[in-house]
Image (spheres, rainbow, N blue to C red):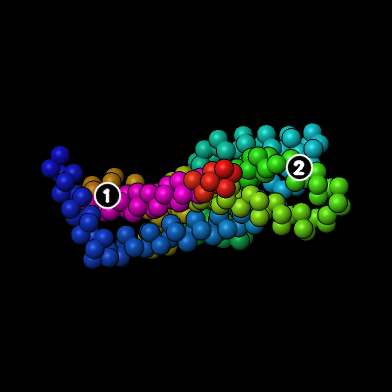
Amino acid sequence: MQFLSEGVTHAVRLLIVGDAEVISAAWNSVWISISAVLLATAVSVPIAIMLYESKSWVSSSLVVLFRAALNLPTVFIGLVCYAVFSRQGPLGSAELLYSPYGVVTGEFMLAVPIVVSLTFGTLQGLDSRILETMRTLHVGSRLRWITYISEARLGMMVAVLTAFSRCITELGIAMMVGGNIKFHTRTLTTATALETSRGEFARGIAMCLILLLIGGCITVLLAWMQRTQESIRA
C-alpha cells in the first residue's frame, strides 16, 4: 500500500504544479465531450419530441432501437468510426481519423441514443392533458415544442448531464479513433491507461482524481435537479 500512498501524494503534487500532460488531457476530455454532447442535444431533442408526438408503430420501433443502442459497447462505435474514417473508408478524405473531431463524431454517436431515450422518457411523464389541450386548440408546432422544452427542461438537463458523464469517461472511442496522441487527442481515460501500463502510477492517479472530481460534480447536479423536480411536482 506504500506505493499507492506515494502515488496519490505525487498525483496531488502534479495537480498543484499544473503538469502539462495532465492539463492537456483534461482539457481535451472536457472540450471534446462538451462539443459532442451539444451537437447530440441539438439533434436528439427534436427527434425525441417528434417520436413523442407520433403514435405510429414506426415511432415505437425507433424508440426501441434508440433504447437498444444504449447498450452498444464504445469499442463497437470506435470500430465503426475507424472503418468509416480510415483511408479505405467512405470518409477517408475528411482526415477525421486520429483527430479530435473524429473523437467528437464518435462520442456524438454515443450521446445521441442517451439524450433521445431519456428525453423521450421525460416527455412521456408529462401530463397527457398538455398534449391534448394543445391539439384541441390547434397550437402551432413551434409553440408546442417550446412548451415541451419548458415543461421537461429538468429531465432534459439530466439527459444532457448523463450523456456528458458517459462521454467523458469512455475509453474505446477515444483510443481507437483518436489514437491517444500526446497533446492532440490524448484524453483523461486514454492517458490513465497509458501511464498505468508504463508504471507511471502518479500521473495515472492524477488523471483519475480529475475524473472523480468531474463525476462528483455531475452527481451533485443530478441530485439537485432530482430534488428540484420532486419539489415542483409536490
Residue located beneath label 1 in the image: 205
What residue sits 57% from the left and 38% below the top?
70
- Residue 175 in view: no
> Which residues fall within the magenta stretch?
202-226
Residue 61 x, y percent position in the rendering: 73, 34
Decide: few, some or many residues near mark 2? Use Cα within 10 Å; few <14, some 14-19, many ≥20: few
Total residue callouts:
2
Verify whether residue 215 appears in magenta.
yes
Q: Quadrant of the N terminus?
A: top left
C-alpha span from label 1 to label 2: 52 Å
Decide: few, some or many residues near mark 1? Use Cα within 10 Å; few <14, some 14-19, many ≥20: many
Q: Main secondary structure of the magenta part?
A: helix
Taking depth in this image into account, of 165 and 65 the one nearest to the observer is: 165
Residue located beneath label 2 in the image: 129
Residue 48 x, y percent position in the rendering: 69, 46
User: Which amino acid does the dot numbered 1 rest on?
Assistant: Ile
Is residue 38 shown above or below 76?
Answer: below
What residue sits 76% from the left and 42% below the top?
129
Taking depth in this image into account, of 188 and 229 the one nearest to the observer is: 229
Quarter holding residue 142:
bottom right
